[in-house]
Image (cartoon, rainbow, N blue to C red):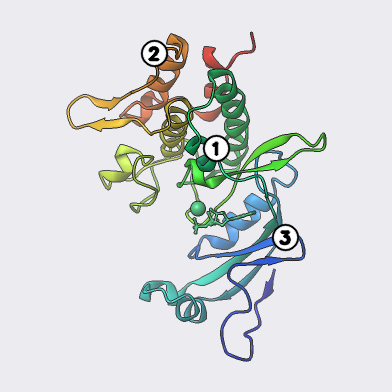
């Protein structure tokens, strides 16, 4: 990891934009940042995670002023800039804007996305902002479309079921109840968000939240009972009842015919 050199204007040399076939983007990661980066980098070659080509460290003070952020506490922290492969196939968000996907397509995508999530969780990395806009399509060696996670700006380290994470992070419609309740939480917050993402694939929208009865599914009548049971288990309000990523892959809905 090398230190970012300030440009003549004093701003950091990158932030967004495309350089040499790769995408350069920035993230504030706080004190855990370098550890998260090294663990994500260690997953090189996983087909369902964006490939990190490099990373460098900058100063929080420069980044906060260059990006126009109002985050006084971030000034003390270093900033880590990721350089990643460029993914040109659009996002899952763009895909569902054209309408819900067929159940078979949703299953195929869910298996791959969950495989990427399992790889992250098995290294103790929690993504914390899983949603359709943070899954982009690239292609695999056979030239087929491959969904890949991007955006590690909210990622943090925690072992499965270790309630050591804090902070209300994530995106409305996809964020786990324990995160909204400002309780300490664990990697199972990603499983809840995965459930919301799969609901969006099948219906175009995340499930609704109901104060008393929890999550309410609104799915087309053609969606199978197995898919509904799959979603109920991922969307459990109590994280202890949610499966881990490895168990999600063993759910009946995801088994090959
Ligand atoms: N590797 C990439 N290839 C192509 N586009 C990307 C890539 N990474 C990010 N983007 C684009 O930039 C947008 C914002 O990036 P993201 O990492 O999600 O940051 P944030 O959501 O925190 O602003 C994405 O929605 C996507 O359109
Ligand atoms: Mg994003």
Indicate the position of residue 88 as horizontal and vertical percent values. 68, 49
**Where does label 2 land, which residue?**
221
Q: Nearer the viewer, residue 29 or 24?
A: 24
Res 180 visible: yes
Q: Is residue 115 above or below residue 217?
A: below
Callout 1–callout 3 Cβ contact below 8 Å:
no
Going by the picture, which residue comes out furthest to the left?
A: 212
User: Could you tell whether 180 is left or right of 243 in the image?
Assistant: left
Judge the density around disc 1: few (<14), some (14-19), many (≥20) Cα neighbours within 10 Å: some
Callout 1–callout 2 Cβ contact below 8 Å:
no
Earlier in the chain: of badge 1 and badge 3, it is: 3
**Secondary structure category for the residue under label 3:** strand
**Where does label 3 land, which residue?**
22
**Where does label 1 land, which residue?**
95
Q: Residue at x 58, y 70 (%)?
A: 15
Earlier in the chain: of badge 1 and badge 2, it is: 1
Quarter-wise, where is residue 193 in the image? top left
Q: Is residue 193 above or below residue 11?
A: above
Earlier in the chain: of badge 2 and badge 3, it is: 3
Indicate the position of residue 101 as horizontal and vertical percent values. 53, 26
Res 183 visible: no
* Quadrant of the frame with the N terminus: bottom right
Cα separation, mark 1 vs mark 3, equals 22 Å
Judge the density around disc 3: few (<14), some (14-19), many (≥20) Cα neighbours within 10 Å: some
Q: Quadrant of ligand 1?
A: bottom right
Going by the picture, which residue comes out furthest to the front?
A: 98
């Amino acid at each position: 990891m090398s230190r970012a050199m300030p440009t003549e204007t004093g701003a950091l040399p990158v932030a967004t934009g495309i350089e040499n076939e790769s995408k350069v983007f920035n993230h504030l990661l706080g004190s855990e940042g370098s550890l998260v980066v090294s663990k994500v980098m260690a997953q090189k070659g996983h087909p369902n995670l964006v490939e990190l080509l490099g990373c460098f460290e900058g100063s929080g003070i420069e980044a906060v002023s260059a990006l126009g952020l109002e985050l006084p506490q971030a000034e003390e922290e270093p900033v880590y800039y990721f350089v990643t492969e460029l993914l040109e196939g659009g996002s899952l968000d763009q895909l569902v804007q054209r309408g819900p996907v067929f159940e078979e397509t949703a299953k195929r995508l869910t298996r791959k996305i969950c495989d990427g999530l399992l790889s992250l969780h098995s290294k103790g990395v929690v993504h914390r902002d899983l949603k359709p806009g943070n899954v982009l399509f690239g292609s695999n060696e056979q030239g087929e479309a491959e969904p890949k996670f991007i955006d590690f700006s909210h990622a943090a380290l925690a072992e499965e079921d270790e309630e050591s994470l804090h902070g209300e992070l994530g995106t409305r419609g996809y964020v786990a109840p324990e995160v909204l309740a400002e309780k300490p939480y664990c990697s199972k917050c990603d499983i809840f968000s995965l459930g919301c993402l799969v609901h969006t694939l099948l219906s175009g929208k995340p499930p609704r939240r109901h104060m008393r009865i929890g999550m309410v599914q609104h799915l087309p009548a053609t969606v199978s009972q197995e898919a509904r049971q799959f979603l109920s288990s991922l969307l459990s309000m109590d994280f202890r009842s949610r499966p881990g990523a490895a168990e999600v892959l063993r759910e009946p809905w995801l088994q090959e015919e």
